[in-house]
Image (cartoon, helix red, strand yellow):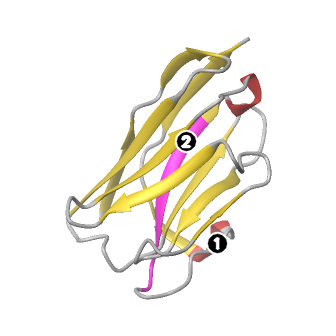
């Protein structure tokens, strides 16, 4: 499966962005999806994840209440709605899928097998 995240850009603090993850080569319907980000000079970190059915989601404390993860299995896409953006949200954002179907959404990077090319989000103060 190939994943491509898009929708990033340059915004001001307080603005919103919506990232989309498109899958090709395989349906993503049965796989938990995660979003991670990597800021310059830092390790990649967990942002949010959603179960394969969309019924359960989880967030890093730093984005809880501001970001919302969702998915549209019929369209083979996932999304990350980011509101009230802060300069510290600046990073390359990646979407990812777990390798096994019908497993749980997790925050562990090692649990995810399929990674797309990231999309840059830059938030100016």
Residue where numbered disc 1 is placed:
110
What's the residue at 55%, 42% (across, down)?
Answer: 93
Label 1: how many Cα within 10 Å (few below 14, some 14–19, many 20+): few
Label 2: how many Cα within 10 Å (few below 14, some 14–19, many 20+): many
Location of residue 94 in the rendering, given as x and y in whole percent from the top left corner? 52, 48
Location of residue 90 in the rendering, given as x and y in whole percent from the top left corner? 67, 28
Q: Sequence-wise, which precedes: disc 2 or disc 1? A: 2
Viewer-proximal residue among 68 and 49? 68
For discs 2 and 1, the disc positioned in front in the rendered view: 2
Q: CA distance from mark 2 to mark 1?
A: 17 Å
Pointers 2 and 1 in contact (CB under 8 A)? no
| Residue 4 against residue 101 in the figure, above or below | above
Viewer-proximal residue among 25 and 52? 52
Magenta region's main secondary structure?
A: strand
In the picture, the quarter occupied by the C terminus is top right
Residue 13 marker: none
99 in magenta: yes
What's the residue at 44%, 85% (across, down)?
Answer: 100
54 in magenta: no
Lateral position of residue 39 relative to residue 71, left or right: right
What's the residue at 45%, 36% (across, down)?
Answer: 18
What's the residue at 49%, 47% (across, down)?
Answer: 80
Q: Which residues are magenta?
A: 92-100
Q: Quadrant of residue 109?
A: bottom right
Viewer-proximal residue among 113 and 77? 77
| Residue 64 against residue 32 in the figure, above or below | above
| Residue 82 against residue 109 in the figure, above or below | above
Kind of element beneath mark 1:
helix
Count all numbered tags in the image, as a single digit.
Answer: 2
| Residue 85 against residue 36 in the figure, above or below | above
Location of residue 46 in the rendering, given as x and y in whole percent from the top left corner? 68, 56
Residue 93 marker: 2
């Amino acid at each position: 499966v190939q994943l491509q995240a898009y929708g990033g850009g340059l915004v001001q603090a307080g603005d919103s962005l919506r990232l989309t993850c498109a899958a090709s080569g395989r349906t993503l319907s049965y796989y938990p999806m995660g979003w991670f980000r990597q800021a310059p000079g830092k390790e990649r970190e967990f942002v949010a994840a959603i179960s394969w059915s969309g019924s359960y989601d989880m967030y890093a404390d730093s984005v809880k209440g501001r970001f919302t993860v969702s998915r549209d299995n019929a369209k083979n896409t996932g999304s990350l709605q980011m509101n009230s953006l802060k300069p510290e949200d600046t990073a390359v954002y990646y979407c990812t899928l777990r390798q096994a179907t019908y497993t749980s959404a997790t925050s562990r990077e090692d649990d995810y097998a399929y990674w797309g090319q990231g999309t840059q989000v830059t938030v100016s103060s």
